[in-house]
Amino acid sequence: MVQAFDEMGDGAGSRAPYAAIREWLASTPPEVFARKRREAEMLFRRIGITFAVYGEGGDPERLIPFDIIPRVLDAGEWQFLARGLEQRARALNAFIRDVYHAGEIIKAGRIPSELVLRNESFLPAMKGFAPAGGVYTHVAGIDVVRVAENEFYVLEDNCRTPSGVSYMLEGREVMMRLFPDLFARYRVRPVSRYPEALLETLRSVAPPACKGEPTAVLLTPGPYNSAYYEHSFLADEMGVELVEGPDLFVEDEIVFMRTTQGPRRVDVVYRRIDDAFLDPTVFRPESVLGVPGLMRAYRAGTVTLANAVGAGIADDKAVYIHVPEMVRFYLGEEPILKNVPTWSCARHDERAYVLEHLDELVVKDVHGSGGYGMLVGPHATTSERSQFAAKIAAAPDRYIAQPTLALSTCPTFVEEGVAPRHVDLRPYVLVGADRVRIVPGGLTRVALRDGSLVVNSSQGGGTKDTWVLEG
């Protein structure tokens, strides 16, 4: 396997952004790191920031491991990423708008019609409907990996209900509390403005019928959801009500919230519920999480849902292959951020290549998330590869494959001391009717097991604070 790029630098010297970090690591006794890690865990547990993993035995509200060594990006690196992220978010929004209206990209032959129209994430209920401000993906979590000094790739796009931002915010708070002296050596751009930026974004897409300051709420599935802490945290930070389905009702195609002072009209719903559960009169009739009549009010233009219903069509892993073409088609620009080379198992010749090279590739279910439904070929057994080959043969449309990238590494505090571990980055892109907002940084996820490339928290990964330096 190709040697991974170490973001701190090799043994001969540090890269400039990490100079003070290397000095700090060399001058700090291991027992201090061990104590600080215990303090960080205690703080996270006291705060209550937990993450339940569905189907997992043991503690249903476990902590995501937090690494106390920050990841550092300099101003130039972040400027490049931010430009690419904004460009990509604009193209994804244009694509969603297009496929629910004229379908120009399909007519032009730039993307196969069956990939969109037969996709389970494509919702006919959104055909011909334009949400307020023309925005579909208000909050995008775009996963980025690095493989060299100046080489970044987008691994996947999360356009439905991306999570994890609370770990970015709380991780920064914990780091500032534990290591004020280290912060004094750097000029780190703050991330604390994210809730304010999110609220500004939500208010910018209030429906035209809204008079005065828009009323926004955060709709959660409830306390049994794995990201419930994040839902309550963001609602509190924005100063909006955290509501569950029964807290809302629809009357005369208008959404109201039940309060002790009587019904209050709602203009914007930041929903953290999947499409299928939003409205039992349109989608799953057995859903008790959503609001009957919500889609009727939405289509009447009296309420905005963020993210838009049907936005998941843009984060399908088979659709991902075509995002660079979306940038060219809708924006008339060359993509700033590159895609990872990707093979579609739906195509006969590409499927044949994938099956012949399973020991070299990462294979993913196009509708999978959280690290589930994937095969990391080089780390799989012969039996596991054979079983996955059978899955591909049975349902080729469900799978794509990518090369096993040598993800960059960052110094990480593990049981044996400080060692390099593979990382990715999920920045959060906020798209409003007025402008795009991106908080400098994001959630760095780290694969804590030696050699592992799977950073997902549901698969044993952890998180790091991401420092973007002032220019």
Image (spheres, rainbow, N blue to C red):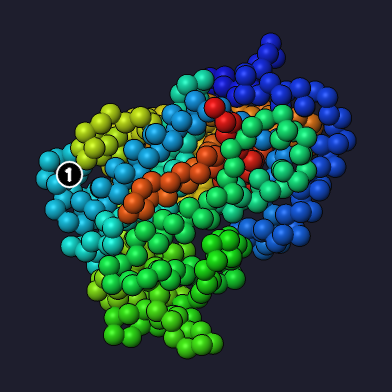
Q: Position of residue 449 (x, y in %)?
A: 67, 37
Q: Which residue appears at 46% of the width and 30% of the height?
A: 79
Q: Quadrant of residue 108?
A: top left
Q: Position of residue 396 (x, y in %)?
A: 32, 45
Can you identify the residue that label 1 sits on?
Answer: 105
On screen, residue 372 above or below 14:
below
Q: Which residue appears at 59% of the width and 49% of the height?
A: 192
Q: Quadrant of residue 310?
A: bottom left
Q: Is residue 111 visible?
A: yes
Q: Is residue 76 left or right of residue 97?
A: right
The quarter of the rendered structure image containing the N terminus is: top right
On screen, residue 115 above or below 414:
below
Count up the numbered dots: 1
Identified by mark 1, the residue type is Ile
Q: Secondary structure at mark 1?
A: helix
Q: Quadrant of residue 421?
A: top right
Q: Is residue 362 visible?
A: no
The residue closer to the viewer here, 283 or 404, is 283
The residue closer to the viewer here, 449 or 90, is 90
